Every structure is written in structure tokens, then in C-alpha cells.
Amino acid sequence: MTGNTRIPKAELTGVYGRLVKRMSRSMLGEVAEPVEVAWHNRKVLEFSFAMNRRAQKWDACDENLKSFAHMAVASMVGCGFCLDLGYFMTHNNDLDEEKAREVPRWRESEMFTPLERDVMDYAEAMTRTPPTVTDEMSAGLLERLGAAALVELTTYIALANLASRTNIAFGIGSQGFSAACDLRPLSVRSPA
């Protein structure tokens, strides 16, 4: 659990603050720390909200694949908040929880299909510095997913990198959302 963010959490005030608190609590049970930190700059917070709302409407790529990709990014980067929230959202959106909990150790797990493995490999390749995405990797996913889904997946992975890296820079870790749902703990990422 966190609490010692690098930028102090702000009190959400005013009508908009009360609305944000109410929405966050209804979705998560509490106010998410990234919201409290970003409250210092409402334009950044509103951009983040708008971006996430729009991304939630994308429907060209399978939701489980996007969820696994996001969690693969979060696991690789080390964003406890994103892993915890991703697992919580998997539960709430009726996605595959058993596979989601295995994402941190997807290379060793036998639960994933070849396509799911390729998606997580692609997510990690995008996350490396410098990125290591290959023509073959992209061609394989393009053939199986189609252009619209691959564009969506790629952008979703980029957004996962934005969120994960921002949370780490802010010093934000897990808030225990998945524990509040009595979800089994996530598997631990194997050493690289």
C-alpha cells in the first residue's frame, strides 16, 4: 500500500471535487491516489479522464488481450498500482481472472494461448528502452488480429506505459483494490 507519494495528495474540493470523489468511490471503493496527486493540475487530470473514457469505447481488440497487455507493461515497469487496478478491473469486467493473476509470470505459466503470449511479448517489446518490436512480431499480430485491432492494441499499450511510468514517478503503488474484492493474490514476476 502507498501513502507517501512524491507529490503530496491534494484534497478534492468544490463541486467538481465532490463529484470526482463520488465517482471514484463508486467505481473503486475509494479515491485513487493518481487522482489525488493530479488534482494539483486539473487540466492534466481532465486530459487523463478524457483519454481513459475514450479508450474504454474502443472495441476492435479483445478486452482480455488489452487487459493482459496492460498488466504485462505494469509488471515489467513495476507499477503496483496499475497491476492492482488491472486485476480489480478484470474482476469487475468479467474478464479471465485466472489468467490475469498469472500475467506477472506469463512466460512460465502454461495458461496462455500462443496469441496471448505474443500480445504480452509485444507489450514488453514496446515497453523496453529502446523498444524491441520487430517486423515479424507486428506481422504475426497483424495477420491474426487485423489492422484495426493492432492499431488499438498498440495505442492501448502506449497508454499503459504512460500510466505506469507516471505512477512510478509520483511514487504511487498498490492501493489494495483487488484485496478488497477478496481476489487471490497476483503471481510474482519471475526475475528477468
Image (cartoon, rainbow, N blue to C red):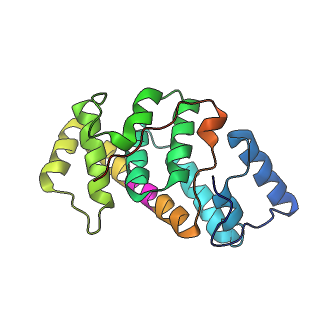
Residue 43: where, in percent of width, then height?
66, 70
37 or 181, which is in the foreground? Answer: 181
The answer to whether 36 appears left or right of 143 in the picture is right
Tell me which secondary structure the magenta stretch mostly adopts.
helix
Write the residue at 76% across / 67% down.
10
32 or 182, which is in the foreground? Answer: 182
Write the residue at 47% across / 29% down.
97
Q: Residue furthest left?
A: 136
Residue 5: where, in percent of width, then height?
64, 67
Looking at the image, residue 61 lies above or below residue 48: above
Q: Which residues are magenta?
A: 155-161
Write the residue at 58% across / 51% down.
174
Residue 130: where, in percent of width, then height?
26, 69
79 or 15, which is in the foreground? Answer: 79
* Res 122 seen here: yes
Q: Quadrant of residue 100?
A: top left
Write the residue at 68% across / 42% down.
28
Q: Quadrant of residue 147?
A: top left
**Does residue 158 belong to the magenta stretch?**
yes
The answer to whether 188 appears left or right of 6 in the picture is left
**Does residue 50 belong to the magenta stretch?**
no
Q: Quadrant of residue 99?
A: top left
